[in-house]
Image (spheres, rainbow, N blue to C red):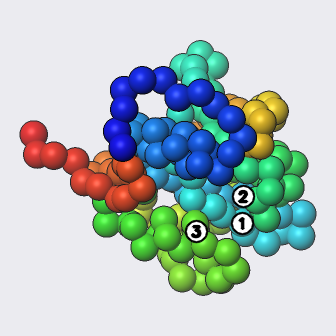
Amino acid sequence: MTTNSPKALSPTDQQSRALRDTLGQFATGVTVVTTRDAAGQPVGMTVNSFNSVSLEPPLILWSIDKQSLSYDAFTTQPHFAVHILKADQQHVSNLFAGRGADKFGQVHWHTGADGVPRLDDCAALFHCRLAQCVDGGDHTILLGEVLEFSASGGEPLIFHRGRYRTLAGD
């Protein structure tokens, strides 16, 4: 059933699913965010909550579920990198969205500034200093100061209504 009338929010599973589906109407790019954990091991996860905040100072944000296995690494380590994925990197998105697997053993990457893992051949990269963590309900919003950035271009990987998409032609 499709409706244009506003939905009343309640904590039911049905309402949560409806809210998620409605939020899915907004197309997003797909990123992988990386850092190192307390033991120095590379950590990464797929994120589509990435957004620009400010040009002066240069700030970006993204959010992480408080139940995420890598929550402590991202909220305590001083630096992280955001990689904007290209349209042909759906496999990278799927890999870093999953749990368990040796993610970094299945992609090309190198160690960048401040020891942060950097994935090779992405559309863009932002190397950031963790500036602030803000409570956001069941998520924490991470605000990052952009220290370095680069863009190699290419068509971006897009996510809309629960599926990967491509951009329409010019």
In this rendering, the answer to whether 76 lies above or below 131 is below
Q: Quadrant of the C terminus?
A: top left
Residue 115 or residue 86, whichever sits in front:
86
> Residue 83 location, x and y as percent?
52, 53
- How many residues crowd mark 2 within 10 Å: few (<14), some (14–19), many (20+)? many
- Which mark is first along the chain, 2 or 3? 2
- Which mark is first along the chain, 2 or 1? 2
Number of numbered callouts drawn? 3
In this rendering, the answer to whether 28 lies above or below 86 is above
Foreground label between 3 and 1:
3
Q: Which mark is residue 35?
A: 2
Q: Which mark is residue 96?
A: 3
Q: Residue at x 25, y 54 (%)?
A: 166
- Rendering quarter of residue 46: bottom right
Residue 65 or residue 14, whichever sits in front:
14
Q: Quadrant of the N terminus?
A: top left
Q: Secondary structure at mark 1?
A: strand
The alpha-carbon separation of the residues under discs 3 and 2 comes to 13 Å
Tag 1–tag 2 contact (CB < 8 Å)? yes
Residue 100 or residue 122, whichever sits in front:
100
**Amino acid tagged 3:** Phe
Q: Is residue 82 visible?
A: no
The alpha-carbon separation of the residues under discs 1 and 2 comes to 5 Å
Q: Is residue 32 visible?
A: yes
> Residue 50 location, x and y as percent?
55, 40
Residue that numbered label 1 is attached to: 43
Q: Residue at x 16, y 46 (%)?
A: 168
**Amino acid tagged 1:** Val
Tag 3–tag 2 contact (CB < 8 Å)? no
Q: Secondary structure at mark 3?
A: helix
> Residue 62 location, x and y as percent?
63, 40
Foreground label between 3 and 2:
3
